[in-house]
Image (spheres, helix red, strand yellow):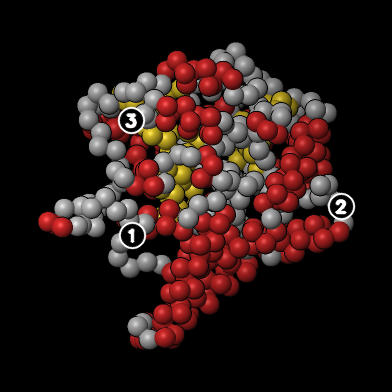
Amino acid sequence: MDSEQGGSDGCLFSQLRADIPLASQYIYLNSCTFGPVLRSVQRCMADALREENEEIIATRGKEAGVRFYERAEKARQSAAELLGVSAADVAWVYNTTTASRLAILSVDWQAGDKLAVTDVEHLSTHRAARGLEQSRGVEVTVIPTAEPREETYRGPAYFLDQLDKMLAPAHRLLVISHVSNIDGRRLPVVEATRFARSRGVKTLVDGAQSIGMFKVDAKEIGAEFFSGSVHKWLMGPPGIGFLVVSDEGKRDYNPFQLPLPTGEGGQPDGSLMAAGALNELGTQNYALRMGAGSSIEAALQIGLEKIEEQCRSLTERLRSGLRGVPGIRVASPEMWEHSSSVMTVQLQDGYPGRCMELVERLLDEYQIVVKYRPEICGVRIGVAAFNTAEEVEQLLTALDHLAPQV
């Protein structure tokens, strides 16, 4: 779908854009870091916070209080619908990093155990791996996702071959991003999860950069753990994310050492607790949950297939235009099946100072918001469903003007 196309789809995205005050001031192409929180989501949270503090907390056990908390719980069902899982599999947490850490630390790591991560994981995952090395003596295996000589990711064949060679039964967990935050490559999470299971290895899929950009079926992916948050492509509030824990994952998952359901003799009877019951302790922020649910509902109402087609159309338009910009090369995969609307570009003979200057001048001179990626010395562009073809053209004009100057 061309973003200039009229009709009902165009109207949907126009309405979405009208719900984003930031879009009238900037060309915002950084949803892979923070998506602008929808105005309707902001109102939902403000109303929920007011209602809870002015009407509910004094009558928590009464009918109005029960209805309030039932409304908050609907957000979990919306998240489950978005992810293709049961509500009992979804736990609320602070963010993707926290969700991933809980999954990683659920393993009873012993010295000599092995952890496998890909070479394009988020910095927080690599920090967690280093911490396990230091504190538990865990051996970390970094699995390359592309051949060293490949300038851009061409597909999953090389990675899956390396996974076959490097992943062993001694590995306790494989951590793999659905979409890399570095260059937007889309990794073969279904195949990787199946392969890991065949060797008795659990899998954690980091969905931070996929949730809200295209349809995700965590049940079909089949990983024991799937982490994510709502503050990027879903344009929800920061400070709330989720961890999906499958039934298989729940069998050994109890991060806070809670007492498990017991049978005769007081011994655990093997019943599986809901992921929320295992994770959500103490007083919760129900306004945040309602905000998360509101942002998820907005995406579901538009439809993830329509959102993906919008993102794909704009990304392909950008990629096509970049071919005519001298001094710029696209470091992200070309085929949509292997990529996403996260795109990183590099400057010819570029170095960090030049890239950071480009980011600053795009903001100062054109009100265009992008981000520097130090891992590959590039500038990352995140094209979201609320962006327009006109904004893509303005970015191309700005790059054509600035690239030779920085």
Query: What residue is pinned by disc 1?
Result: 277
* Whether residue 113 is situated above or below residue 122 in the rendered picture: above
Mark 3 burial class by Cα count in 10 Å: few <14, some 14-19, many 20+: many
Does residue 162 appear to the left or right of 298 in the view shown? left
Tell me if I can see residue 133 in this picture.
Answer: yes
Residue 293, x across and y down, in percent: 54, 64
The mark that comes first in sequence, 3 or 1, is: 3
Amino acid beneath label 1: Ala
Residue lying furthest top: 149
Mark 1 burial class by Cα count in 10 Å: few <14, some 14-19, many 20+: some
Mark 2 burial class by Cα count in 10 Å: few <14, some 14-19, many 20+: few
- Closer to the camera in the image, 170 or 42: 170
The mark that comes first in sequence, 1 or 2, is: 2
Amino acid beneath label 3: Arg
* Whether residue 157 is situated above or below residue 101 in the rendered picture: above
Q: Which mark is residue 172?
A: 3
Q: Residue at x 38, y 34 (%)?
A: 202
Residue 216, x across and y down, in percent: 58, 46
Q: CA distance from mark 1 to mark 2?
A: 46 Å
